Image (cartoon, rainbow, N blue to C red):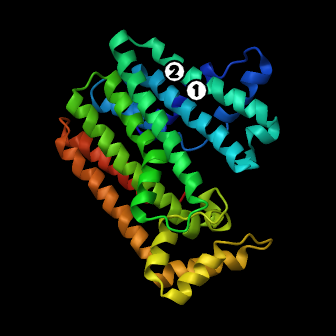
Amino acid sequence: MQTTQDYQKAFITYLETFSRDREPENLYTPINYILKLGGKRLRPVLTLMSAEIFDVDYKKALDAALSIEVFHNFSLVHDDIMDAAPLRRGKQTVHEKWDVNTGILSGDAMLILAYQLFENYDAETFVALAKLFSKTALEVCEGQQYDVDFETRDDVTILEYLKMIEYKTAVLVGAAMKMGAIVAKASEEDQNSIYEFGRLLGIAFQLQDDYLDAFGDPETFGKQVGGDIIENKKTYLYIKAIEFLNTSKSKQLQQLFGVSLEDNEEKINTVKQFFVESGSADATKEEIENYTNKAFSVLDSLSISNEKKALLKQFGHILMTRKV
Protein backbone atom coordinates (compact mmCIF):
# COMPACT_ATOMS: atom_id res chain seq x y z
CA MET A 1 0.00 0.00 0.00
CA GLN A 2 1.12 3.54 -0.81
CA THR A 3 0.87 6.56 1.48
CA THR A 4 -1.75 9.24 0.89
CA GLN A 5 1.03 11.53 -0.35
CA ASP A 6 2.14 8.88 -2.85
CA TYR A 7 -1.38 8.60 -4.25
CA GLN A 8 -1.68 12.40 -4.46
CA LYS A 9 1.64 12.72 -6.27
CA ALA A 10 0.80 9.95 -8.76
CA PHE A 11 -2.62 11.45 -9.41
CA ILE A 12 -1.32 14.98 -9.98
CA THR A 13 1.29 13.64 -12.41
CA TYR A 14 -1.47 11.82 -14.32
CA LEU A 15 -3.65 14.93 -14.25
CA GLU A 16 -0.88 16.85 -16.00
CA THR A 17 -1.18 14.53 -19.03
CA PHE A 18 -4.93 15.16 -19.12
CA SER A 19 -4.70 18.96 -18.79
CA ARG A 20 -3.07 19.54 -22.15
CA ASP A 21 -3.75 22.39 -24.57
CA ARG A 22 -6.70 21.66 -26.86
CA GLU A 23 -8.91 23.55 -29.25
CA PRO A 24 -11.05 25.56 -28.98
CA GLU A 25 -8.88 27.28 -26.42
CA ASN A 26 -11.76 29.16 -24.79
CA LEU A 27 -13.46 25.86 -23.94
CA TYR A 28 -10.48 23.91 -22.60
CA THR A 29 -8.37 26.61 -20.92
CA PRO A 30 -11.01 27.17 -18.17
CA ILE A 31 -11.16 23.38 -17.65
CA ASN A 32 -7.39 23.18 -17.17
CA TYR A 33 -7.56 26.23 -14.90
CA ILE A 34 -10.11 24.76 -12.44
CA LEU A 35 -8.42 21.35 -12.42
CA LYS A 36 -5.07 22.91 -11.49
CA LEU A 37 -6.42 25.06 -8.65
CA GLY A 38 -5.53 22.32 -6.20
CA GLY A 39 -7.75 21.15 -3.39
CA LYS A 40 -7.48 18.08 -1.17
CA ARG A 41 -7.77 15.58 -4.08
CA LEU A 42 -9.62 13.45 -1.52
CA ARG A 43 -11.87 11.59 -3.94
CA PRO A 44 -9.23 10.43 -6.46
CA VAL A 45 -6.96 9.37 -3.60
CA LEU A 46 -9.80 7.22 -2.24
CA THR A 47 -10.30 5.59 -5.64
CA LEU A 48 -6.62 4.69 -5.93
CA MET A 49 -6.48 3.50 -2.32
CA SER A 50 -9.59 1.36 -2.78
CA ALA A 51 -8.12 -0.38 -5.84
CA GLU A 52 -5.02 -1.35 -3.85
CA ILE A 53 -7.12 -2.41 -0.87
CA PHE A 54 -8.51 -5.09 -3.21
CA ASP A 55 -5.05 -6.15 -4.46
CA VAL A 56 -4.87 -4.34 -7.80
CA ASP A 57 -2.14 -1.91 -8.88
CA TYR A 58 -3.53 1.56 -8.14
CA LYS A 59 -2.30 2.77 -11.55
CA LYS A 60 -5.13 0.79 -13.17
CA ALA A 61 -7.60 3.03 -11.33
CA LEU A 62 -6.07 6.35 -12.47
CA ASP A 63 -8.71 6.93 -15.18
CA ALA A 64 -11.54 6.25 -12.72
CA ALA A 65 -9.87 8.55 -10.18
CA LEU A 66 -9.50 11.26 -12.80
CA SER A 67 -13.14 10.87 -13.79
CA ILE A 68 -14.35 11.47 -10.23
CA GLU A 69 -12.10 14.53 -9.89
CA VAL A 70 -13.22 16.01 -13.24
CA PHE A 71 -16.86 15.50 -12.25
CA HIS A 72 -16.30 17.03 -8.80
CA ASN A 73 -14.73 20.12 -10.34
CA PHE A 74 -17.50 20.34 -12.96
CA SER A 75 -20.00 20.53 -10.10
CA LEU A 76 -17.92 23.27 -8.44
CA VAL A 77 -17.89 25.39 -11.63
CA HIS A 78 -21.69 25.26 -11.84
CA ASP A 79 -22.15 25.68 -8.07
CA ASP A 80 -20.01 28.84 -8.19
CA ILE A 81 -22.24 30.25 -10.93
CA MET A 82 -25.37 29.50 -8.88
CA ASP A 83 -23.83 31.07 -5.77
CA ALA A 84 -22.30 34.02 -7.69
CA ALA A 85 -19.09 33.10 -5.86
CA PRO A 86 -16.09 35.30 -6.71
CA LEU A 87 -13.38 32.96 -5.35
CA ARG A 88 -12.59 29.25 -5.36
CA ARG A 89 -9.54 28.08 -3.39
CA GLY A 90 -8.42 31.69 -3.12
CA LYS A 91 -8.49 32.28 -6.89
CA GLN A 92 -11.07 33.74 -9.27
CA THR A 93 -13.90 31.37 -10.12
CA VAL A 94 -14.24 30.33 -13.77
CA HIS A 95 -17.27 32.53 -14.44
CA GLU A 96 -15.50 35.52 -12.89
CA LYS A 97 -12.24 35.01 -14.76
CA TRP A 98 -14.09 34.43 -18.06
CA ASP A 99 -17.89 34.78 -18.04
CA VAL A 100 -21.04 32.83 -17.10
CA ASN A 101 -21.52 31.32 -20.56
CA THR A 102 -17.96 30.00 -20.55
CA GLY A 103 -18.53 28.52 -17.09
CA ILE A 104 -21.67 26.72 -18.24
CA LEU A 105 -20.17 25.36 -21.44
CA SER A 106 -16.80 24.34 -19.96
CA GLY A 107 -18.66 22.67 -17.10
CA ASP A 108 -20.82 20.73 -19.56
CA ALA A 109 -17.69 19.60 -21.40
CA MET A 110 -16.14 18.41 -18.12
CA LEU A 111 -19.14 16.17 -17.46
CA ILE A 112 -18.71 14.56 -20.89
CA LEU A 113 -14.94 14.18 -20.40
CA ALA A 114 -15.58 12.46 -17.08
CA TYR A 115 -17.71 9.82 -18.82
CA GLN A 116 -15.20 9.42 -21.66
CA LEU A 117 -12.51 8.27 -19.24
CA PHE A 118 -14.47 5.06 -18.61
CA GLU A 119 -13.83 4.07 -22.23
CA ASN A 120 -10.31 3.08 -21.21
CA TYR A 121 -11.68 0.03 -19.36
CA ASP A 122 -13.05 -3.30 -20.56
CA ALA A 123 -16.77 -3.52 -21.36
CA GLU A 124 -17.86 -5.05 -18.06
CA THR A 125 -15.95 -2.49 -15.99
CA PHE A 126 -17.15 0.34 -18.25
CA VAL A 127 -20.81 -0.57 -17.69
CA ALA A 128 -20.40 -0.89 -13.91
CA LEU A 129 -18.56 2.44 -13.63
CA ALA A 130 -21.04 4.26 -15.88
CA LYS A 131 -24.07 2.94 -13.95
CA LEU A 132 -22.59 4.00 -10.62
CA PHE A 133 -21.51 7.35 -12.05
CA SER A 134 -24.96 8.15 -13.49
CA LYS A 135 -26.70 7.29 -10.21
CA THR A 136 -24.22 9.37 -8.22
CA ALA A 137 -24.30 12.38 -10.57
CA LEU A 138 -28.09 12.55 -10.36
CA GLU A 139 -27.99 12.32 -6.55
CA VAL A 140 -25.45 15.17 -6.42
CA CYS A 141 -27.88 17.30 -8.48
CA GLU A 142 -30.71 16.37 -6.11
CA GLY A 143 -28.55 17.32 -3.12
CA GLN A 144 -27.74 20.66 -4.68
CA GLN A 145 -31.44 21.34 -5.24
CA TYR A 146 -32.23 20.48 -1.62
CA ASP A 147 -29.51 22.93 -0.57
CA VAL A 148 -31.04 25.66 -2.73
CA ASP A 149 -34.53 24.92 -1.39
CA PHE A 150 -33.31 25.16 2.21
CA GLU A 151 -32.18 28.76 1.68
CA THR A 152 -35.81 29.93 1.71
CA ARG A 153 -37.10 27.56 4.39
CA ASP A 154 -37.17 28.09 8.16
CA ASP A 155 -38.34 24.58 9.01
CA VAL A 156 -35.45 22.40 7.80
CA THR A 157 -35.13 19.29 9.99
CA ILE A 158 -31.98 17.40 10.98
CA LEU A 159 -33.07 14.40 8.89
CA GLU A 160 -33.58 16.63 5.84
CA TYR A 161 -30.20 18.25 6.35
CA LEU A 162 -28.44 14.90 6.69
CA LYS A 163 -30.12 13.69 3.49
CA MET A 164 -28.97 16.85 1.69
CA ILE A 165 -25.30 16.46 2.69
CA GLU A 166 -25.46 12.74 1.92
CA TYR A 167 -26.54 13.47 -1.66
CA LYS A 168 -24.48 16.61 -2.20
CA THR A 169 -21.22 15.32 -0.69
CA ALA A 170 -21.21 11.82 0.77
CA VAL A 171 -22.42 9.77 -2.22
CA LEU A 172 -19.46 11.04 -4.25
CA VAL A 173 -17.06 9.87 -1.54
CA GLY A 174 -18.77 6.47 -1.52
CA ALA A 175 -18.68 6.29 -5.32
CA ALA A 176 -14.98 7.18 -5.38
CA MET A 177 -14.21 4.17 -3.20
CA LYS A 178 -16.57 1.83 -5.05
CA MET A 179 -14.98 2.79 -8.37
CA GLY A 180 -11.63 1.54 -7.10
CA ALA A 181 -13.30 -1.70 -6.05
CA ILE A 182 -14.99 -2.04 -9.48
CA VAL A 183 -11.68 -1.57 -11.28
CA ALA A 184 -10.18 -4.22 -8.97
CA LYS A 185 -13.12 -6.54 -9.78
CA ALA A 186 -13.87 -7.03 -6.09
CA SER A 187 -16.96 -9.00 -5.13
CA GLU A 188 -20.30 -7.20 -5.25
CA GLU A 189 -20.55 -7.49 -1.48
CA ASP A 190 -17.16 -5.82 -1.00
CA GLN A 191 -18.02 -3.13 -3.57
CA ASN A 192 -21.19 -2.27 -1.64
CA SER A 193 -19.42 -2.35 1.73
CA ILE A 194 -16.61 -0.04 0.64
CA TYR A 195 -19.25 2.30 -0.82
CA GLU A 196 -21.08 2.35 2.52
CA PHE A 197 -17.81 3.03 4.35
CA GLY A 198 -17.17 6.00 2.05
CA ARG A 199 -20.75 7.30 2.25
CA LEU A 200 -20.78 7.32 6.06
CA LEU A 201 -17.30 8.83 6.20
CA GLY A 202 -18.49 11.45 3.69
CA ILE A 203 -21.33 12.52 5.99
CA ALA A 204 -18.88 12.82 8.89
CA PHE A 205 -16.52 14.75 6.61
CA GLN A 206 -19.21 17.31 5.71
CA LEU A 207 -20.32 17.71 9.33
CA GLN A 208 -16.66 18.30 10.22
CA ASP A 209 -16.49 20.89 7.44
CA ASP A 210 -19.57 22.63 8.89
CA TYR A 211 -17.94 22.66 12.32
CA LEU A 212 -14.62 23.97 11.03
CA ASP A 213 -16.42 26.71 9.10
CA ALA A 214 -17.51 28.16 12.44
CA PHE A 215 -14.75 27.06 14.79
CA GLY A 216 -11.72 26.37 12.56
CA ASP A 217 -8.40 28.17 12.80
CA PRO A 218 -8.28 30.97 10.20
CA GLU A 219 -4.57 30.21 9.68
CA THR A 220 -5.17 26.60 8.61
CA PHE A 221 -8.80 26.35 7.46
CA GLY A 222 -8.14 27.75 3.99
CA LYS A 223 -11.49 29.52 3.76
CA GLN A 224 -13.06 32.42 5.58
CA VAL A 225 -14.11 31.22 9.02
CA GLY A 226 -17.79 32.01 9.51
CA GLY A 227 -18.59 31.85 5.79
CA ASP A 228 -21.70 29.73 6.39
CA ILE A 229 -22.90 32.20 9.02
CA ILE A 230 -22.39 35.16 6.67
CA GLU A 231 -24.36 33.31 3.96
CA ASN A 232 -27.09 32.33 6.47
CA LYS A 233 -26.64 28.62 5.70
CA LYS A 234 -28.78 26.36 7.86
CA THR A 235 -26.13 23.82 8.81
CA TYR A 236 -26.33 21.08 11.44
CA LEU A 237 -24.97 23.61 13.97
CA TYR A 238 -27.77 26.06 13.23
CA ILE A 239 -30.61 23.53 13.22
CA LYS A 240 -29.47 22.00 16.52
CA ALA A 241 -29.09 25.46 18.10
CA ILE A 242 -32.67 26.35 17.12
CA GLU A 243 -33.79 23.04 18.65
CA PHE A 244 -31.90 23.58 21.94
CA LEU A 245 -32.33 27.34 22.56
CA ASN A 246 -35.24 28.82 24.45
CA THR A 247 -37.87 30.71 22.45
CA SER A 248 -36.34 34.15 22.96
CA LYS A 249 -32.79 33.20 21.94
CA SER A 250 -34.06 31.00 19.13
CA LYS A 251 -35.86 34.01 17.65
CA GLN A 252 -32.68 36.10 17.99
CA LEU A 253 -30.71 33.48 16.09
CA GLN A 254 -33.38 33.27 13.37
CA GLN A 255 -33.33 37.05 13.02
CA LEU A 256 -29.54 37.03 12.63
CA PHE A 257 -29.91 34.44 9.85
CA GLY A 258 -32.43 36.66 8.10
CA VAL A 259 -30.13 39.62 7.49
CA SER A 260 -27.06 40.47 5.44
CA LEU A 261 -24.61 42.93 6.99
CA GLU A 262 -21.66 44.99 5.77
CA ASP A 263 -19.59 44.11 8.85
CA ASN A 264 -20.14 40.49 9.83
CA GLU A 265 -17.61 40.11 12.64
CA GLU A 266 -20.13 40.79 15.41
CA LYS A 267 -22.72 38.53 13.74
CA ILE A 268 -20.23 35.65 13.50
CA ASN A 269 -19.16 35.99 17.14
CA THR A 270 -22.76 36.20 18.39
CA VAL A 271 -23.89 33.17 16.38
CA LYS A 272 -20.87 31.13 17.51
CA GLN A 273 -21.75 32.02 21.10
CA PHE A 274 -25.28 30.69 20.51
CA PHE A 275 -23.80 27.47 19.05
CA VAL A 276 -21.62 26.94 22.15
CA GLU A 277 -24.16 27.99 24.80
CA SER A 278 -26.96 25.88 23.32
CA GLY A 279 -24.85 22.73 23.17
CA SER A 280 -25.10 22.67 19.39
CA ALA A 281 -21.31 22.72 18.95
CA ASP A 282 -20.88 19.67 21.20
CA ALA A 283 -23.82 17.90 19.53
CA THR A 284 -22.18 18.40 16.13
CA LYS A 285 -18.88 16.94 17.37
CA GLU A 286 -20.79 13.96 18.77
CA GLU A 287 -22.51 13.39 15.43
CA ILE A 288 -19.17 13.56 13.59
CA GLU A 289 -17.87 10.84 15.90
CA ASN A 290 -21.11 8.87 15.51
CA TYR A 291 -20.88 8.73 11.70
CA THR A 292 -17.15 8.03 11.81
CA ASN A 293 -17.78 5.03 14.10
CA LYS A 294 -20.62 3.86 11.83
CA ALA A 295 -18.17 3.92 8.92
CA PHE A 296 -15.60 1.94 10.91
CA SER A 297 -18.19 -0.70 11.83
CA VAL A 298 -18.69 -1.42 8.10
CA LEU A 299 -15.04 -2.52 7.84
CA ASP A 300 -15.92 -5.75 9.66
CA SER A 301 -17.87 -6.93 6.60
CA LEU A 302 -14.96 -6.40 4.16
CA SER A 303 -13.02 -9.48 3.06
CA ILE A 304 -9.63 -7.80 3.39
CA SER A 305 -6.77 -8.20 5.87
CA ASN A 306 -6.88 -6.62 9.31
CA GLU A 307 -3.83 -4.61 8.30
CA LYS A 308 -5.78 -3.01 5.43
CA LYS A 309 -8.77 -2.40 7.68
CA ALA A 310 -6.43 -0.62 10.09
CA LEU A 311 -5.13 1.55 7.23
CA LEU A 312 -8.68 2.58 6.28
CA LYS A 313 -9.46 3.32 9.92
CA GLN A 314 -6.28 5.39 10.23
CA PHE A 315 -7.26 7.37 7.11
CA GLY A 316 -10.69 8.02 8.62
CA HIS A 317 -9.17 9.28 11.86
CA ILE A 318 -6.85 11.62 9.96
CA LEU A 319 -9.82 12.94 7.97
CA MET A 320 -11.94 13.58 11.06
CA THR A 321 -9.20 15.32 13.06
CA ARG A 322 -8.11 17.61 10.25
CA LYS A 323 -7.86 21.38 10.71
CA VAL A 324 -8.41 22.27 7.03
Asked whether disc 2 touches disc 1, contact meaning CB atoms under 8 Å apart, the reply is yes
Instruction: Report whether 237 appears left or right of 113.
Output: left
Badge 2: residue crowd in 10 Å (few <14, some 14–19, many ≥20) = some
Give how far apart the Cα atoms at labels 2 and 1 are. 7 Å
Which residue bears the numbered disc 2? 115
**Residue occupying the far top of the picture:** 123
The reply to whether residue 239 is visible in this rendering is yes
Where in the figure is residue 7, as x and y percent of width and height? Answer: 46, 33
Which residue bears the numbered disc 1? 111
Instruction: Report whether 138 appears left or right of 100.
Output: left
Where in the figure is residue 86, as x and y percent of width and height? Answer: 76, 49
Q: Which residue is located at x 61 percent, y 61 percent?
A: 152
Where in the figure is residue 65, as x and y percent of width and height? Answer: 47, 28
Tell which of 179 and 220 is nearer to you. Answer: 179
Picture quadrant where residue 220 is located: bottom right
Q: Which residue is located at x 40 percent, y 73 percent?
A: 283
Instruction: Report whether 89 appears left or right of 55.
Output: right
